[in-house]
Amino acid sequence: MSTGQLVIGYLGGLVLFSMFICIVVMLYLAHTKMDMLLRLFPNSTGVKTLEPLRHAGIWGKLMLIGGITGYVAFPRLYLKNGQLSCEDLQAIPNSLRFKLAVMHWVLVTLLLAMFALFFIRKSGLFN
């Protein structure tokens, strides 16, 4: 195994470990702050359609938190199609809004890094 392949392998392991940490943080947030998060979106139809997922076990809670972070990270898209209420978005405290958006962007970045490392490895660039 070449040095480049080892570096790609270790970076892939680091990305997977970071994704695991993010999932644990999201589950902790879902377990401790779910009621408060759902109370912040009383007029948003998108969150109301996701709300039954809170009773669907671990994966449902992850999907619900992921949906809420998506609404906070990309508000224009959801405001435009009516899934998110402007009043609900403004009622979220700025510190929480920032944390949710950062969490979403970190997961998107880690997912893109995982795919990039996979394609670099499969391209044979480091053989």
Image: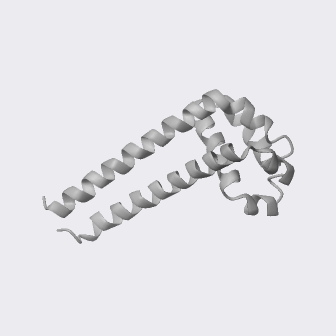
Here the colouring is: one colour
Q: Residue at x 44, y 39 (%)?
A: 21
- On screen, residue 48 versus residue 11, left or right, reads right
Q: Residue at x 26, y 52 (%)?
A: 10
Number of marks in the rendered image: 0
Q: Determine whether 2 is above or below 123 in the image.
A: above
Q: Residue at x 77, y 48 (%)?
A: 46
Q: Residue furthest front?
A: 95
Looking at the rendering, in which quadrant would you find the C terminus? bottom left
Q: Residue furthest left?
A: 1
Residue 51 picture quarter: top right
Q: Residue at x 67, y 44 (%)?
A: 95
Residue 17 coordinates in the image, percent (x, y):
37, 43
Residue 97 coordinates in the image, percent (x, y):
68, 47
Q: Determine whether 57 is above or below 88 in the image.
A: above
Residue 102 coordinates in the image, percent (x, y):
57, 51
- On screen, residue 11 versus residue 6, left or right, reads right
Residue 12 coordinates in the image, percent (x, y):
32, 53
- On screen, residue 75 versus residue 22, left or right, reads right
Q: Determine whether 66 is above or below 116 in the image.
A: above
- On screen, residue 101 versus residue 42, left or right, reads left
Looking at the rendering, in which quadrant would you find the N terminus? bottom left
